[in-house]
Amino acid sequence: MVVRDRAWSAWEGSVTPASRRFLVLTRYALKDVFESRVFLAFYILCLIPSAAALLAIYFSHNTQFLEQFGGIDSWFAKAPDWIFLHLFGWQAMPAFLVAVIATPPLIAADIGNNALQVILARPIGRREYVLGKMVVVFLLLSPITWVPGLLTFCLQAILAGGQWTAENLRIAVAFFVGHVVWILVVTMLCLAVSAWIRLAAFSRGALLAIFIISAVAGRLVNGVTRSSIGDLLHLSKAIESVVLRFFGATPPSGLPSPANWLTLVVVVLGALWVLNLRLRAVQEIK
Amino acid sequence: MQALTTSANLRARADTDGRNAPPLLEIQGLSVRLGGRIILDRLDATINGQIVGLLGPNGAGKTTLVRTLLGYFRPSSGNAFVLGHSLATAGRTVCSIIGYMPEDDAYISGMSAVRFVRMMGELSGLPPDAALERTHDALTFVGMGENRYRKVGSFSTGMKQMVKLAQALVHGPRFLLLDEPTNGLDPAARHRMLELIKDIGHEGKTGVLLSSHLLGDVEAVCDEVMILKAGRLAGRCDLASEHEAARTFVDLETLPPEPRFGSVLERLGCTVEDRGNGRFRVELPPDLNVRTLFSAAADQGLGLRRFERTRDSLQDIFMRAMEDDHGRS
């Protein structure tokens, strides 16, 4: 057994760089998230669409395999086009569920018992605090979204050759930028809800409700006004439209691109407003 | 305003050239407004003591002062310097040298004490390994060694207070802000907490500002006391000197009540405080025999119905400060 003196001494060693200190919050939060084995199992399941896409791409270039399934006219031969058209959606939906499951305690746990006042008493500001929590969601969602998306693209590029890569480079950019935009919007929403609602179950419900209610409201307004103006309220349609434009596909929204961006910007600004309101060491009396 | 200094503390903070280091805390005309109300009003103070008590009635501005030092509230005017670092221009540096134990609960209930305190250490800049080692030291120091792997949410109030103290200490702050540290503690836990505060302060490297409305706590551990009233400094006292001086006070009451007996006592060399209705608090000169007081009373045809030896308690100092001209109650 270690015997320690009952005495206290000041720290006189070196300290870590202040610019990287927000990553402490990230590290601790990620460890908390993956402490649940159920969550870990679900997270691994979320990799299945990406793994299936990689396999399909590989087999679409395997002549022996193709001969057994109908040659170049088979589904497998045409798989890459189909995969790149749908992979984003296959990745986004489980990734959203990952965010809904994992993010509610991120800020709520710190606010719940006033831990924020001892965290913000350290040499770390509110911006760094939010940045630390944002990185958690980004690191959580990246391995199941844009990272395997780009890996799939790279595999296809290697197997299909330089010409295909040059002609379809837009897909890689769309995968990365589209997912980053999507992750940013989802991250801000999740953090705002986590800062606002303390109970995780209610937070999860609220996150789902935001998407469902915005969709219903958007459709209602569209129905009443017989226009597409309601798409301004339709959050998932706005995200989808922005992302599909990156891929060069036809967006579902009838509104022009800036209108879809406006929806996303308003959501992010709203989330920042909530965070600014809630993330205080102590609530100041106005 | 006179800065009160303990010699041991000055020695501890003197640099190698022999020049004195900056004071622990220097407050210059600090004003804070919250909700349109002035909470701190052009506060001026210099603190050099090793364990300094911050006293005041509820709403005097104690907690606001502590939170302003942490950067939670922006001063409307004035500034404060912690060990020479300006709050206005070096707020982050100030935060890095301060350890803060808040008044109310402050923990992450799902985390073990070790994990919580270690995270706080790392957020203050300790490398992960050092943070872990010092976390074990800090938790052992506050007497939480046996329970350190339990979740903080499952702790009793007293244990949570100790974890709060450990997280305030883990990074080895040079200035410790303790806001009502004995809140909700039973007598044994309160005694343990006060002993720990004494240990920390008297070890010499960490200055302590103890904000409390419990005079007994402050009197038990502090060298200096700063008394706030309505956001202003209403008084201060060097408790260490008071204790060392060991002055003798007597509370007495004449029968019948005779206000002029005070001047008789003053002629005997006593310092007299007339408390009305023939009651006096008398500070005796060192060479005066108390029998002389009885004789003086008999010479005036008076009896003494109350004669009680006492010392100038913090409560007296506090009450005087509350009635003082600086902030007449």
Image: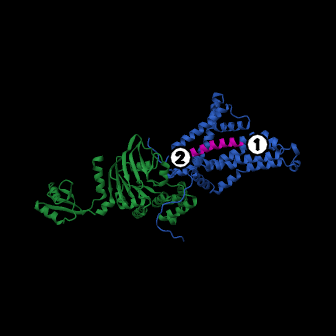
Q: Which residues are magenta?
A: A175-193
Identify the mark at residue A239; answer none if there is no mark: none
| Same-subunit check for callouts 1 and 2 | yes
Residue A94 sits above or below residue A3 on the image: above
Q: Position of residue A217 (x, y in %)?
A: 62, 35
Identify the mark at residue A126; answer none if there is no mark: 2
- Which image quarter holds the C terminus of chain A? top left
Q: Amino acid at mark 1?
A: Phe
- The hue used for chain A is blue
> The numbered mark 2 sits on a residue in which chain?
A
Residue A48 sits above or below residue B112 on the image: above
Residue B281 sits above or below residue A127 on the image: below
Q: How is the image coloured?
A: by chain
Quadrant in the rendering for residue B11 = bottom left
Let me know if residue A238 is in the magenta part. no
Cα distance, mark 1 to mark 2? 39 Å
Question: At x 68% / y 31%, what residue is drawn?
Answer: A254
- Which image quarter holds the N terminus of chain A? bottom right
